[in-house]
Image (cartoon, rainbow, N blue to C red):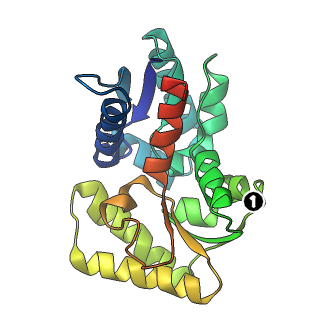
Amino acid sequence: MRKIGLLGGMSWESTAEYYRLLNEGVRDALGGLHSAQIVLASVDFAEVEGMQVEGRWEDAGALLAAEARGLESAGAEVVLLCTNTMHKVADDVASAVSIPLLHLADATADAVTTAGLSTVGLLGTAFTMEQDFYRGRLDSHGLKVLIPDAADRALVHGIIYDELCMGRVEDASRDALLAVARRLVVRGAQGIVLGCTELELLATPGSLGEIPLFPTTRLHVEAALRFALEL
């Protein structure tokens, strides 16, 4: 079994999901008392969020690159950046280490294309929905990506930062999020990418009936398990 390096804390709520899902995956694959070999670097999200708001992406990249080097020094054989938004600096992280970084958007795109879909709606933070670092990566796999209108983007961003990252899971917000997703379906989305790791605390596959949801945390974990267990 290869050792997995998790670069998390953005927020710790979703990083806890990574840890749980990886260990459940290894247990299910190997049985008995088996669990995942993991090293975890968890940063202070308040510091990172300040860099996001101030547009200090170079500083954020340097911070996460240093943490990734620490993971490699601790024996990690692969790095997972446990956040969609901070994949904006994925190249900085990948270039700082000699071990592979499993890109979250690639794992997501593989699942979408395997499902035979070509057009998806993307929900996430404003950074993820509005900037090209994530949408462009999906585009590179031949996918058409739809995003909500400005009011809906602000709504989803607020749910993530003001509630989910604070450990609050509200039924009213689940309803609002699914309403945003349905509006994307009306515009032509064949499926919805939950492009923020915290969104899986609100919505799960089946929440939109026959319209598939793509839970990026779980897809990322599945890719990591394939790598770690050489499946």
Q: Quadrant of the C terminus?
A: top right
| Location of residue 50 in the rendering, given as x and y in whole percent from the top left corner | 42, 48
Left or right of 129: which side holds 165? left
Instruction: Please tell me whether mark 1 sits on a helix, a strand or a loop.
Output: helix
The residue at which mark 1 appears reads as 139
| Location of residue 92 in the rendering, given as x and y in whole percent from the top left corner | 64, 32
Report the number of numbered marks: 1
> Which residue is at 51% across, 77% downward?
211
| Location of residue 23 in the rendering, given as x and y in whole percent from the top left corner | 31, 32
Left or right of 52: which side holds 41? left
> Which residue is at 37% across, 23% downward?
38
Amino acid residing under circle 1: Asp
Indicate whether 91 appears above or below 205: above
148 or 114: nearer the eye? 114
Question: Dot 1, crowdedness within 10 Å: few (<14), some or many (≥20)?
Answer: some
179 or 107: nearer the eye? 107
> Residue 166's image quarter?
bottom left
> Which residue is at 50% across, 75% downward?
153
| Location of residue 87 in the rendering, given as x and y in whole percent from the top left corner | 57, 44
44 or 174: nearer the eye? 174
